[in-house]
Amino acid sequence: MINYVLIGAAGYIAPKHMKAIKDTGGNLIAMLDPHDSVGIIDNYFPSCKLFTEFERFDRFCSQQNDNGNIIDYVSICSPNYLHEAHCRFALRIGANAICEKPLALREKNVNDLERIEKQTNRKIYTILQLRLNPTMIKLKKEIFLINEHISNVSLIYHTPRGDWYDHSWKSNKEKSGGLVTNIGIHLFDLLFWLFGSYLNFHIKTVTARTIDGIIYLGEMAKVAEINFHLSISEKNKALRLLTIDGKEYELSNNFTELHTESYKQILLGNGFGVTEARPAVTLCEALRIIT
């Protein structure tokens, strides 16, 4: 059986990782979070140990490996600014990392992680679940056949957040990477995957809770001009919509089991790694500088 430990157990995204581990036949033996409100673990791994201090968690992981109970993967669901450090921790104890987006907040730190991979002969995987959406896979094949500029593209992503957001680490750019990283990075990754390399961008408007702009992706012979609108405003209803030449693609469809599918692909050796994660991190860093 494949053994996992999980960092960031009390967050919103952690239950999806717990479910993915269980659904793929893994065993979650320990988790770390300074907050102890993690009763949801009883639904998945009731025997899992909880640590609220990193030092004790670190000692436990080292003891497990020394005793031959090897930790194969560290699943990372901690706040964004800690992802890089926790990836380093995973590789240091001889495990592979499965990290939520973003792997890091800066491209130079992504490059550092790539070097550490080579030094340790371990792998860092990231969850880019929209690439596994069957509708998006079909769309990518259709876009590949287009041999001209694609100008009529829009991405609207409304995901309302309450007052709590402004008082959490997510509202701190140094910790979260700001709005473009919090809610934009997996969408930007999808756009890179669908349309190609980054060329340029233009920001139209920015507020504390919205950002509008244009991204140009592709090659000089075939450029996609993508108007995007990201919002966490409570005034907007939830909406996740990609539109290409008038055809709408609801990004919430076929979405519920994609973390489990991500884990399946990682276990098969087909997971997304540092190379795939880099373009969206680079774009978000550039957007953050001017917003």
Image (cartoon, rainbow, N blue to C red):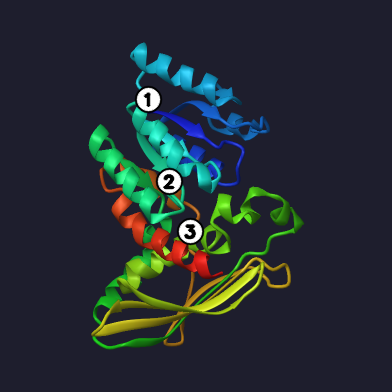
Camera-near label (2 vs 1) is: 1
- Taking the spot 69% from the left edge, 68% from the top edge, the residue there is 233
The spot of residue 48 in percent (x, y) is 53, 23
Residue under circle 2? 260
Q: Residue furthest right?
A: 163
Secondary element at image label 3: loop
**Given the image, on which type of amino acid does mark 2 rest?**
Thr
- Taking the spot 33% from the left edge, 66% from the top edge, the residue there is 193
Label 2 to label 1: alpha-carbon separation:
19 Å
Q: Is residue 162 left or right of residue 194?
A: right
Residue under circle 3? 255
Q: Is residue 59 left or right of residue 272?
A: right
- Taking the spot 48% from the left edge, 58% from the top edge, the residue there is 255
Camera-nearest residue between 26 and 155: 155
Circle 3 packing at 10 Å, graded few (<14), some (14-19), many (20+), is some
Circle 1 packing at 10 Å, graded few (<14), some (14-19), many (20+), is many
Camera-nearest residue between 262 and 30: 30
The spot of residue 2 in percent (x, y) is 35, 28
Residue under circle 1? 71
Vertical position of residue 197 compared to residue 107: above or below:
below
The spot of residue 235 in percent (x, y) is 73, 72
- Whether pointer 1 and pointer 3 mark residues with C-beta atoms closer than 8 Å, the reply is no
Secondary element at image label 1: loop
State which quadrant residue 158 falls in.
bottom right
